[in-house]
Image (cartoon, rainbow, N blue to C red):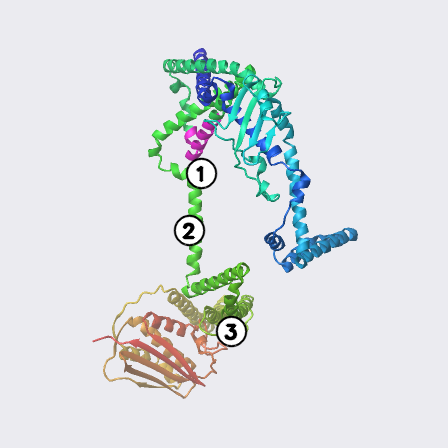
Amino acid sequence: MDTKWKNRMKIIGWLVLFAFGVSGVISALINDNDYYQRSYFKTTQFQYELDQLTQYIFAFEITYQTKEDWKEAITVSKDEIEHYRDQYGNLTEQISDIEMQYQPRINEAKANKNNKIADIYIKERDQKIEEITKNFESDENVKKSIIKEKEENIDKYFKELESYRQEYENYQEVFVYYLKNKETGHIYTNLKTDNKKSADLYINEENTYFLQSFPAKENGYLLFDAGPLFIGFEDLTDTDSIDYNDRYEGKIGVSKDAPVTNMIMQNYHNYDTQKIVYWIYTIAGVLALAASGIIGRRISVLQNIAPSKWQSKYNAIPFDVALILQGISVIASVALIDSTSNIYYNIDADDIIITLVFLTIMIGVTMILAIYLYNRLKTIRDDKGVWQKTIIGRVLKMTRNVFAGIVNIFRNAFLNRRVGTQVFLLLTLVFSFGVLTALIFMDEDFLALFIPSILFIGLPLIILIIKRTGYFNHILSNASALARGEFKPDLNIIGRSVFAQLAEDINQMKHGVKTSQNAQAKSERLKTELITNVSHDLRTPLTSIITYSDLLKNPELTEEERNTYIEIIDRKSKRLKVLIDDLFEASKMASGAVELTKAKVDIVQLLQQSLAEYNETAEESKIQFRVSNPEHPVYALVDGQKLWRVFDNIIGNVVKYSLDHTRAYIDIKEENHQVRITFKNISKYELSENIDELFERFKRGDESRHTDGSGLGLAIAKSIIDLHGGTLDIDVDADLFKVTVILDLLDN
């Protein structure tokens, strides 16, 4: 612990020594022009005082006039009148600006029921409007306003000038001068005489500490500078008669009778002491700097001043922030070093100690940051993300994102090039009219170009914009109504613009929504019917099974009754199985989970086999089949078992739902590499006009549902034909029921 403390004390001592050395050397370099001189009167500080004196002589004597003389010399030109009158616009614009300025105040006062305040505002407004109106009616009124404004500026100038009079009088306590304008012969002096010979008795080497004559080889003629006091001086009145570059001859000196208490004289008397301090401080600083270099090597300052454990935390700072911190520490150190250069003017031990303490701290901070920065720079190549983590990098990234966003805005604006181009041209025209309008106020000749442009381009453009805006609003209203579920009449398609395309799209969207709503309503209705039909078809056989099962439990049943009940249960069970099997089959078809085993099949033979299954049933129902088919085989690549199911379902429907003692027709034809199988029969039930519903599940021609069947036959048949890439269509003409199946033929 003691060793660490000793090392720290050594580092602190070295920093104090180094800071003192740097301060002494730098301050010596800064003040070398002043303290290398033999006399105070050769220093830049005294030269500044001399320049100040000449500026005050110029202000208070050479150019000085009374306030009243300046005001009497005020002139107003025609250009000034025109500029003053039009500086805030024409009469209408200025009156409008005044009304806009006062109207909110008047309204607020009236709202607060403060009529007195409102009347005051109204009176002020009317008075200003009256003054503005007079300005446009009479040049004399404008001239009076300009003169009043210039008089106010003269008052401000003299108030500012008088604030420097005390300082000027302090300079006159020290300096004596006698100056003559060679051109005009005017004499300017603070002596009691204006005679040159008498002035030489007062201003000579015996009576002055410093004496400078004009003209001289090294100085030439004395040239006066208006200085910062006279910024805007020319605007107060007509100063063309004043020649700032008149050449003056004479003498300026520092009187030996000047009071010692004057600041200039104090600086003069303190100069020798300050010079001694300067050299002592400079030599001590050089020795301290040399000693710090020797001691620093022995105690390895650079290795011990910056603890390595803080390096990782320093590296976490964004790199550009680290550079800024380094820059701030360097600037603060330089500022403190510069402040030590003024210690010679006001030697105060406490101030020197405080300044050196802060300088030591700042130099220490600067060195520590510099060491950490140097170590970081050695490894910066390995840190690939260092620039992305900087504040500048983040700002650049954000700027890039903003720029990319702007590019996307323009890109999106030109997704439809026609629209983007039209908008760009429209904005260009509007901007051009704005520029042209501004040019009219600058030069009335542009009015000849503005009027035809407005008539032949501007007005048609405005009409077009209003027309397109109305059309767009109409489209927007129709779209809003569509969003609320209201169906207004179709929009008119006007022209070939983007609005016309939008109107057409909205019309199509509206029709699509209508179709979707109708389909949804139909779906809901069919869903309800499906649930009702499934419940009915499944519950009917199930109820019979339960009922006759309960009857079988009666021990008093005869054998004949028992057999009858068992036969009914068996028949209803098979009926229930058929319904469930068909339901599963239809579900598989709808989900597409059915695999086809295709093979070369003769359609004619397959149809005849299906008809053979219904020979007895057809005879019982007294329905006569009339089959028309080619004499040669008709081959197709199909799943024979699945296609047999199609024929079986269709023929079964014909047998069950055909009117007794009627004929059913089956026709097989080949055309365009396809086979067309047509089934026709006369229905015993009145058919629905919506034939698409016959393909729905559990939908039957027998709405009373007294016939056998699951109501899934046609739905399963259509799904099978769809899987084969064919079509199954139904046509109804009164009681004539027609089913058409089309399949692709097998290429030979």
Which amino acid lies under the numbered mark 1 shown in the image of this protein? Ile
Vertical placement of residue 616 versus 387, above or below: below
Numbered label attached to residue 404: 2
Who's the residue at 26% across and 84% down the image? Answer: 630
> Magenta stretch containing residue 323, yes or no?
yes
Q: Nearer the viewer, mark 3 or mark 1?
A: 1
- The numbered mark, 3 or 1, whose residue comes first in the sequence reads 1
**Residue 555: in sight, yes or no?**
no
Decide which of tag 3 and tag 2 comes sooner along the chain. Answer: 2
- Which residue carries the number 3 mark? 491
The magenta span reads: 313-332
Task: Please name the predominant secondary structure of the magenta segment in the image.
Answer: helix
Q: Are marks 1 and 2 in contact (CB under 8 Å)?
A: no
Q: In the rendered image, which residue does mark 1 sit on?
A: 391
Name which of mark 1 and mark 2 comes first in the sequence: 1
Residue 337 horizontal/vertical position (percent): 48, 22
Q: Is residue 457 visible?
A: yes
Quadrant of residue 58 in the image? top right
